[in-house]
Image: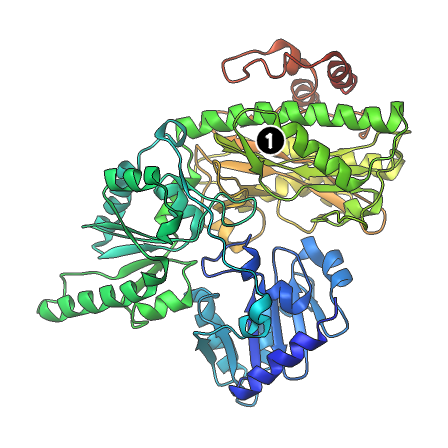
Amino acid sequence: MNTTSQLAKLRSLMRERSIDVYVIPSEDSHSSEYIASCDARREFISGFTGSAGCAVVTHDSAALATDGRYFSQAARQLDCDWTLLKQGLPDVPTWQEWTASQSSGGKSVAVDSSLLSGSAAKRLGDQIRKAGGSGLVPLEENLVDIVWSHDRPARPCQPVRVLSEELAGKSVTRKIDDLRQELSKKNCPGFFVSVLDEVAWLFNLRGNDIPYNPVFFSYATVTMEEAILYIDESKLTDACISHLRANGVRVRGYESFLCDARQLYEDVKAKRLADRKGAGVGSFLISNKASWALYRALGDDGSVEEIRSPVGDAKAIKNETEMNGMRSCHVRDGAALIEFFAWLENQLIEKKNSVDELQAAAKLEEIRRKHERFVGLSFPTISSTGPNAAIIHYGPEKGRCAVIDPNRVYLCDSGAQYLDGTTDTTRTLHFGSSPGGAIKQAYTLVLKGLINLHTAVFPKGTTGFALDCLARQFLWKNGLDYRHGTGHGVGSYLNVHEGPIGIGTRVQYTEVPLAPGNVLSNEPGYYEDGNFGIRIENMMMRRYHSIFDEQYPVSNASFDSRPWEPPQYDWLGKHLAVPYFVEEGPCKRGHLRKQRSRRGVWLAFQHL
């Protein structure tokens, strides 16, 4: 993609406004990782389509920063106008450091204040001033939107639907009451909910405004007196309106949110002035993901306390209904994966048919659609063969994808949204002749790391940061590693990437201990650029005395059977074919027992 034209237009706008450096984050006004097409500003200006990164443009240069998942993809997609900042590598500046370095000599740096969190804006502003810049300028307009003009996609306006308490496991009234208890402890006037999956979870609603994520554009305010949902009211069905009314929730227009926040700030400020003792009202609470624009609307004067969202914390701890739903949907999803891989091997080996990466992904979705409570995919399927498997977040494209080679590694990372849960599973398979020694060794080390984390026993208060090394240690002993986190939280019929929990080296993972009810992925890997990639991913559910994980089998054709300890053999025996034929329970609904002959034979063949 040639970005010269849009960069020239953007720089013209920057000069008109006396802006020397312009920052273009990936996120939308709700700090979303996955965004609607109308908010894909960084992609529009740079040509880079990955889900994480930040673009920074000056009058004579442009830089795109992203993490290790996207190094190969970004190098391929960026044109000569851009410099790639590979975040996390030695001697490579962070995008914040690079931005600050461009501001020396009193230059101005600007950003759309709705796209950067208040805390991130403060830190960046401090770095800019320390480097000799004039500070960070908050803009209420977005310069990329002006360049995009009439070609910018319209904002989605999909209908919202109610998630029944039977599936949610907890009423809206109880969730709001729990939040008010947190407000009462801090003597604060209210909490502003700005993250989309938190709004959806709090009000037991689901939408379709962002692909693969059942959320809708909205905000919420909860005080001790009332709860307000800010949304385009045309999205609400009669059932939604009745549902909200029954739970005491008032509805206001989406565009009214910041204006109402300013008014609430003024009302509370007046109340503070009237309280001679000054102890009547505490500070507003906002999430550490809330935008700088909201921070400024609330006075930006010490009237705001920024915290980790209590709604996000509550959402990450699944109730019993949600946990049962996650188990059930993973059984159905596992059945779909078994059918898919049996079909794929039959096409490649028995029928000698040609199947490309995109055709395989489409077939997997077709199979999933047959299962009850299926809603859609939870992210675009990563269907990759050979060297494409080394691109961590590879996406096959029509006309450019590869034909699957049975004699090379095939990596499939996929997931789905069901009414009762969200799935995310990765398997790496080799259908043809035995893979080479390097692939077998790498697969074995990755699988041992996955088992090591699955079988870990740890005390209360342990964080995902502390557990990360358990999945990497076998790779480390051989001088190998992978450039992504080991695990992420997963929503319940919500976002497939859910905070605040995770397993990895991010600072945020040191702050939140894992708790019973957390659902996380376990996905170590290894990638050799231009050759192959390996990743194995299961879901784990944190319990008091045990961990649930999905029982889709791993392939014994890809690992070395010699270097295993007895506990690892025990785990393998429980996670291959046998459980699918001998286990039965209410949540299984006969999905696995009803596999047809060919699928049963394929599954048995995978058994060690």
Residue situated in front as seen by the camera: 398 or 177: 398
Outermost residue to the top: 582
Determine whether, in the image, residue 259 is placed left or right of residue 135.
left
Q: Where is residue 391 in the image (x, y as percent from the top left)?
A: 75, 50
Q: In which quarter of the image is the N terminus?
A: bottom right
Considering depth in this image, is 483 or 605 the residue closer to the camera? Answer: 605
Q: Position of residue 486 (x, y in %)?
A: 62, 43
Above or below 558: residue 496: below
Query: In the rendered image of this protein, does residue 135 appear above or below residue 298?
Result: below
Mark 1 residue type? His
Residue 546 in the image: state x and y as whole percent. Answer: 50, 25
Helix, strand or loop at label 1? It is: helix
Above-or-below relation of 468 to 80: above
The foreground one among 264 and 245 is 245
Please provide percent x and percent y for residue 229. 32, 51
Tell me which residue sits at (44%, 76%) in the image: 138
How busy is the neighbourhood of tag 1: few (under 14 within 10 Å), some, or many (20 plus)?
many
- Residue positioned 32% across, 62% down in the render: 256
Relative placement, left or right, of 533 versus 498 is: right
